[in-house]
Image (spheres, rainbow, N blue to C red):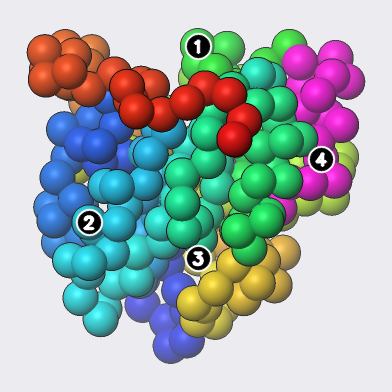
Amino acid sequence: MPEAAGRSFVDLHVHSNASFDSLSKPADLVRNAERFGLTHLAITDHERIDGALRARDLAQASVRVIVGQEVRTSGGDLIGLFLERAVPPGMTPAETAAAIHEQGGLVGLPHPFDRFRSSGGDIATSGGPLAELASAVDYVEVHNARAMGSANHLAAEFAHAHELPGVASSDAHSLMELAVAYTYVDGDFRSADELRALLPGAGMVMGRASYLIRLWTPCAKLVQRARGNRRIPPNVSTSPQ
């Protein structure tokens, strides 16, 4: 990873073993983020933030951990960054975005056209809820290292059409995927407002995850299922609070 004075390097979409489909320990993610030269790391587990909180507690001064969450809404996934508490799944995209903003967080639209995941896909292209949500979204993931086919190209077109900043993320579910794609900005940031101000000038490194590495995800799901870790934790309500 290149070095530049005053430049921040951030992977905005990473999963720890708090997610139902990853076995990456928070401590290992933090250690590897530092080794790879990242200055910021967003842990965005499905429907929970406890893994991100553990990573934040373990992080050294050289890596700042952003507490995030990948939230399943009624119209596809959204990412919340700079959270203090988990956002309940199952709400509409607009309600979810409002809940994230109420915490002072950033709202990201991850892999919006990946038809193999809870991503909105046809909804976004048909002018449905995700298109309507454009005014509430702070950035679009225009390059997801795991996305297939034309998904990233369509995401970039969507971001351009709605004049939204674009970012690149690894969507890492394993340590080997961390920082294969990432975003860099000219300046440091510690808050959602500071990152929001920097994102329009962001640059991207658009690496791709190996398909062989991605075969590890089904194995991780089986292990986590045996441990009782499912996408919606038993103590998490799927209805708005």
Asked if residue 125 lies left or right of residue 111, the reply is right
2 vs 3, front mark: 2
Q: Position of residue 178 (x, y in %)?
A: 28, 46
Query: What amino acid is labelled 1 in the image?
Result: Phe
Say which quarter of the image contains residue 203: bottom right
Measured in 3D between alpha carbons, the distance from the residue under mark 2 to the one under mark 4, in whole angstroms, is: 32 Å
Q: CA distance from mark 3 to mark 1?
A: 27 Å
Residue carrying label 4:
134
CA distance separating discs 1 and 2: 30 Å
- Determine the CA span between mark 1 and mark 4: 22 Å
Check disc 2: other Cα within 10 Å, few if <14, some if 14-19, many if 20+. Answer: some
Q: What type is the residue that disc 4 sits on?
A: Ala
- Between disc 1 and disc 2, the foreground one is 2
Of 174 and 241, the residue lying toward us: 241
Residues 104 and 179: in front is: 104
Q: Name the residue carrying label 3.
A: 184
Left or right? Give the position of 178 relative to 88: left
- Rendered view: 75 above or below 7: above
- Label 2 close to label 3 by CB (< 8 Å): no
Residue 116: which disc? 1
Residue at point 85% right, 46% down?
Answer: 135
Give x and y (percent) for residue 234.
Answer: 32, 22
Instruction: Return the residue at label 2.
Output: 54
Which badge, 2 or 3, comes first in the chain's sequence? 2
SS for dot 2: helix
The quarter of the image holding the C terminus is top right
Between circles 3 and 4, the one closer to the viewer is: 4
Mark 3: amino acid: Tyr
Q: Compute the Cα span from label 3 to label 4.
A: 23 Å
